[in-house]
Amino acid sequence: MSFAAESQRETPGDFIDHDLDRLQRDMYCVFGRQGTISNADNTNMKVSIDTQLMSDDSSSTSTEEPPFVQIDMDIASEPIQHTTMEPTIYRHQNPPSLSFSSISLQLSGGRKSSKADSYRKQLEREMTRALQRKDRDEYDSSDAGQRMTTDDDRMSVVNYHSDSPLENLPDEVLIRIWSFLDPPSIGRTAQVSRRLRDISYDIPMWRDNTIHWMQNKTQGLSLDQLHRYSYSFFVRQFVSFRKGEKKKEEEVKREQKVLRDQRRRTRASRIMKAASYGRVWEWICAICVVLFTILLVLRLQDILQCAWSIVFIPLFFIMAQLLLAPTLYDAFRTYYDYNFDTELEPDEEQNRVCGPIFFYLAFPAPLQVDPKTSRCFIYPSVTLITLWIILLVLKLDGTTSLPHWAVFLPLIITTFLWSQLPLWVGGFSSILSDSRRIDRILGCSVILSLAVFLILLVLKLDGRMEETWYVVMSPLWVGKGIFMMTPIFFTVVKLWVYLCGCGLTCCRSTTRFFSHWGTLCVTFLGISTMVLVPLLVFEILMAQLLQGIAHPFAVVFIPIFVIEGFILCGCCVVNCAFLCSD
């Protein structure tokens, strides 16, 4: 029989058939299960609904009390789309239906209890009102394009849309449908259904569902076990499930945040290594120092005819690295509130090949120990030295007519800043009370000798001083003499204290030389041999050249090349030591 012939005359029973099919599909949208409804069950359900809807043509309906109806929730053939809350569209097959086999739904009959009868009647009335809410004409027009009938079997094309009767069901009916679920299942369903999530906080829902659960879940239990199945028990089960889910979500969010922060810190450390903290940049800076010395000698010998700005390009690159390295580290350290000690420290396994060594000791290490003092020392020093190099290049190229004191003013300020650094680290009170006050005073005196030399150099270049260049170089020689004579002086004092047996406490309270005598002697000897002595020879040769004693610039700069050779050898030794360390 075709659908048109079938729909020519519809009785209330036929209307209920159609709506029960629709309700059956909509319940599938909620549970995501598949089953079947037998004709006998449909007949029993139609008899149970309010008799005012029944016409005279429904006299053939059975009046027997239907048995317990059970819903099979075990197998889901077609899952629901939880992202859109729309079910899968079925083509050329019968729509999924429900099999009453597992959870008891007492529509009629069964236990002869007044509570069951009252709930049965209330459920029948609610289902009847829900089924009558859609107009029959609207139902026929929307359902005509969804059903196709053939001679052999009946194929259905289900097209769910936003006007589904499930969307118009009242909350009471949905609560009854969801009452067949246990509290954890309600919690899981509430994760994907906003409407159920709102309903799940409704107190009457739990009051009604608790009665249903007690009627179906407490069978066969003794009296001492029934106290667990109270209203508060089911509520606690649901609340504990929701709390557990929320706790799991928070743990997942924390783990994701930790992993996200770790990835960001790793990315930041890679950026720093690629920009300025890779070991390759240290080698490039060392090579730039040698290259600048070679270009300077060639330019002074007039072998290379070019602007002074080209000669100073290696120094510009070095100053750019010295300015970028602390700025980049300080920016990432402040932004992530993380010191990147593991990512940049040379002792770490991942940094032994390509990690920084000297740049780490120059910038990250001081910024980690005392950020404020290190910032006040690093950034002004690098900026002032860069400014001095720029002014010097402009002066040598004749671009500017600034006096020499204006050109050397940034460098003079830098030396005074360096002379105050030991006092800033230990505090001004350390001059009188610190156990290392003699060491600090010696360091300040050596740096101040450099400042005095710069002042004399400016006066000599501006023609305000007629003394020889030996007098101008004398502050540098005094500073080197203090540095080289310090270990000898303290060694003599140590021997005198050892022979006399007095004054040891006073000496240890003013300097650490006596506590680390051997280490400091070796350090002073190495620095004096590899740096100070060649530098002293260079200064003497330069003073003689300026005084008119002819020396080729290649000869004058030999001590500088020796110092640079020692520096490159030292870099090789240090790198090999880190590579071979366990």
Image (spheres, grey):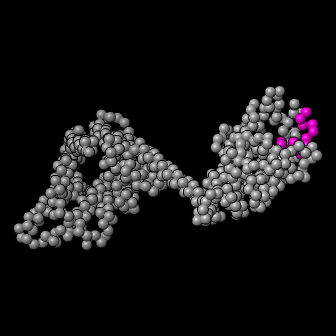
- Picture quadrant where residue 9 is located: top right
Predominant secondary structure in magenta?
A: helix
Relative depth, front residue between 16 and 308? 16
Please identify the quarter of the rendering in which residue 466 is found.
Answer: bottom left
Is residue 579 something that shows in the picture?
yes
Q: Position of residue 64 (x, y in %)?
A: 82, 48
Q: Nearer the viewer, residue 108 or 330?
A: 108
74 drawn magenta: no
Residue displayed at 87% across by 33% down: 3
In the rendered view, would you say 398 is above or below 207? above
Looking at the picture, how far across and down is residue 382, in whole percent? 38, 53
**Where does residue 205 sit, x and y in percent of width and height?**
71, 60
Q: Nearer the viewer, residue 548 or 347?
A: 347
Q: Nearer the viewer, residue 487 or 410?
A: 487
* Quadrant location, the C terminus: top left
| Residue plotted at (87% across, 31% down) | 2
**258 horizontally vs 146: left or right:** left
Q: Which region of the structure is painted magenta?
A: 5-20
Name the residue located 82 percent from the left edge and 34 percent from the top edge: 147
Is residue 8 shown in magenta?
yes
For residue 226, side relative to residue 408 (left or right): right
The picture places residue 263, in percent across and down from the top left corner, at: 47, 47
Q: Is residue 391 left or right of residue 93?
A: left
